[in-house]
Amino acid sequence: MKQLITYSILFFITVFAYAQKPAYVIYNAKGKVVKYEKMLGALVKNDILLFGELHNNPIAHWLELELIQDIGKQRALILGAEFFESDTQTSLNDYLSSTINEATLQTQVELWSNYKTDYKPIVDFAKTKKLAFVATNVPRQYAQLVHKEGFKVLEHLVPDEKQYIAPLPITYNPDLPSYKKILTMFEDHGTPELVKAQAIKDATMAHFILENYIENKFFFHINGAYHSDDYEGILWFLNQRNENLNYVTISTVEQKNVSELLEENKNKADYIICIPDSMTKTY
């Protein structure tokens, strides 16, 4: 009788466990399910991680913080992110060192609309742990100029302005599938200059990652998935500058059914976070 009760309990525990709706599933590039702990163990062996997020997805932001905390237990960390532009580095440093408070930071930096819910916990973790946090993205006014006139407009910037972008001239590959896709995604608005505006962001983020990378530390970078999907974007520029470092990528995708990774989402990154498309959004 006791054995029957034991088996019954185990049966109900098993059924209950499998009856839960997963908030996410981790896959490797080939579409095989990977446990969080196994992914973590593989990530920490690298030098630089590009975490490709969906900007409005709460699961991606939660996992970013969880990974930062867990990797930080094993490796010395440097953080960096797309959501801070390079010309805000001084203000960000002042906030991290408590020279200014958050209210002052908000007056000096154009924070993203979802900063408080999605990014502030990560920045405040860096502040508490006294971690370096690198503002990697190109200032938006320069990306806008490139969108209008191409790379040539950057040559007219003064030295103080050029310090905020990747070194000139910008060498990029317009035949990368991700860049060619932009031409069709935006239909009539998909111009070569729009592709270059994307490329200056990728190049600048790669530049500031490498400029601030320190040997034997782990650089955790947060960016939109499109900036590193398919091993292109930022990663392409990183490899042009230094192919001797160990890079690893994560992408975030949404699917109606997360029990199997769609073919179109395989090989986007070394690890793919698959999230139900019904997940609530932060904006």
Image (cartoon, rainbow, N blue to C red):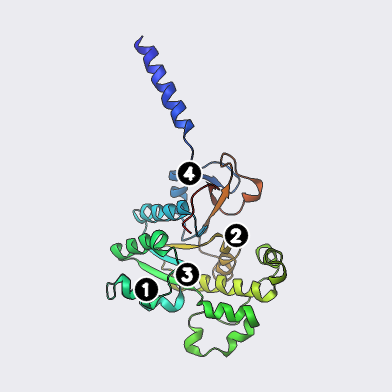
Give how far across and how far down residue 102 sits, in percent. 32, 70
- The answer to whether residue 77 is seen in the rendering is no
Q: Which residue is mark 3?
A: 209
- Vertical placement of residue 248 versus 5, above or below: below
Give how far across and how far down residue 43 sits, in percent. 46, 53
Residue positioned 49% across, 58% down in the render: 56
What is the crowding at mark 3: few (fewer than 14 residues within 10 Å), some, or many (at least 20)?
Answer: many
* Type of amino acid under label 2: Tyr
* Type of amino acid under label 4: Ala
Q: Quadrant of residue 193?
A: bottom right
Can you tell which mark lies on residue 231? 2
What is the crowding at mark 2: few (fewer than 14 residues within 10 Å), some, or many (at least 20)?
Answer: many
Circle 3 SS class = helix
- The answer to whether residue 123 is seen in the rendering is yes
Lower position in the chain sequence, tag 3 or tag 2: 3
Q: Quadrant of residue 84?
A: bottom left
Circle 2 SS class = helix
* Type of amino acid under label 1: Gln
Q: CA distance from mark 2 to mark 1?
A: 34 Å
- Vertical placement of residue 86 versus 222, above or below: below
Q: Nearer the viewer, mark 2 or mark 1?
A: 1
Give how far across and how far down residue 154 sits, in percent. 58, 85
Can you tell which mark lies on residue 23? 4
What is the crowding at mark 1: few (fewer than 14 residues within 10 Å), some, or many (at least 20)?
Answer: few
Q: Quadrant of residue 107?
A: bottom left
Circle 1 SS class = helix
Lower position in the chain sequence, tag 4 or tag 2: 4
Q: Which residue is mark 1?
A: 106
* Type of amino acid under label 3: Ile
